[in-house]
Image (tube, helix red, strand yellow):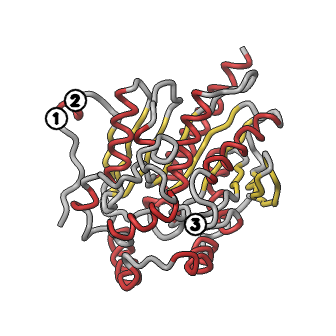
Amino acid sequence: MPTAYDPSPKQRREGEWFVTHPLSEHDSGAVAALRSAVAPAKGVFDGIAGRERFDAFMQSVPAPRDATFEAATVGGVPGWWARTPSSHKDAAIIYIHGGWFTWGRAEAFRNVAGHIALSAGTDTFVPDYRLAPEHPFPTAVRDVEACYHGLVEEGTQNVAIVGDSAGGNLALVLLSIAATRARPNSAPPVGAVVFSPITDLALTGESYRLRAEADLYFTKAEAATLARNYLGGANPTNSIASPLYADLTELPPVRVHVGDDEVLLDDSRRYVEKALAAGVDAKLDVWLGMPHGFALNIGMFDASAKALEFSGAFLAECLKSTASHRDQ
């Protein structure tokens, strides 16, 4: 059995950036059942043929009460709004969906976006960025960047960014771009939350070895295929391909949630450590026994509800604090 991630004694003394959440009895049983169900497909790459099945799984997330949905285009990028009746004025969240850059549609993720919108009290837009291999790197980056600038040009001054998995990669890339290359008269993002982000497409994290057995879904060989599928020959250490290799100075607050049973555990840990070294307000939440993308398994895990609750409170505070500062 893998041991839980444990920072060095020096890191433990340095503060509150790292939090471990215990595995509940309910979640232990739920993970065991899920592990049994998905075991035959572990490490199997089915390319674009898997898109319909992936979307069906995401559409099975329970629809949130009190959220409404509408198709729209922002910055020339189509997508879906998840609206909440108590949204912050002049504020929005961009939620960038996962799927290893190969799978996923905004419509399939709208229920997830609705839960995020309600937890943060802020309307949330899911861009339908173009997928690989038909549209390899950096197409998805340019799409989410266009979406961000479109929101700002429409008058939305307070924007937070959220993403999961590959969407977490794109969220952190967008965060760096928008924070360091802000256009005249536009404000940088106020903060970001990412769930199980892919930050290193060079796949150098030790957790690919240490969590190889524990991970429910992925193997390093499959991850390498997915990375090549997206990169199309580009350098995996390019800073807009892998946010771990970016200059992280000047970033707004960042919160990262990851399962302890993920081969991507080190992608989260190393990104947060680098952000902290750059002076960023960053925090890592590691959820023991949880698989990749657990936060999106709404209704399945207790940990999902808690992660969304913590994330919503953080996002609401970022949006509120920034708006109040600008109004002064």
Mark 1, secondary structure of its residue: helix
Q: Look at the image and tell me in which quarter the N terminus lies.
A: bottom left
Camera-side mark, 2 or 3:
3
Q: Is residue 121 above or below residue 293?
A: above
Looking at the image, the residue that sits furthest to the front is 233
Residue 62 x %, y %:
62, 70
Q: Do residues under tags 2 and 1 come within 8 Å of each other at their CB atoms?
A: yes
Q: Which mark is residue 9?
A: 1
* Cα gap from disc 2 to disc 1, whole angstroms: 6 Å
Res. 133 mark: 3
What secondary structure is marked by label 3?
A: loop
Q: Which residue is mark 2?
A: 13
Question: Is residue 297 visible in this depiction of the protein?
Answer: yes
In the picture as drawn, the residue positioned furthest to the top comes out as 328
Q: Amino acid at mark 2?
A: Arg
Marks 3 and 1: which is nearer the front? 3
As rendered, which of 319 and 79 lies closer to the eye? 79
Q: Position of residue 190 (x, y in %)?
A: 61, 31
Q: Is residue 223 left or right of residue 250?
A: left
Which picture quadrant has residue 24? bottom left
> Residue at 35% across / 78% down in the picture?
35
Where 12 sits versus 75, above or below? above
The answer to whether 152 is drawn above or below residue 63 in the figure is above
Percent x, y for residue 267?
36, 49
Distance Cα–Cα, label 2 vs label 3: 45 Å
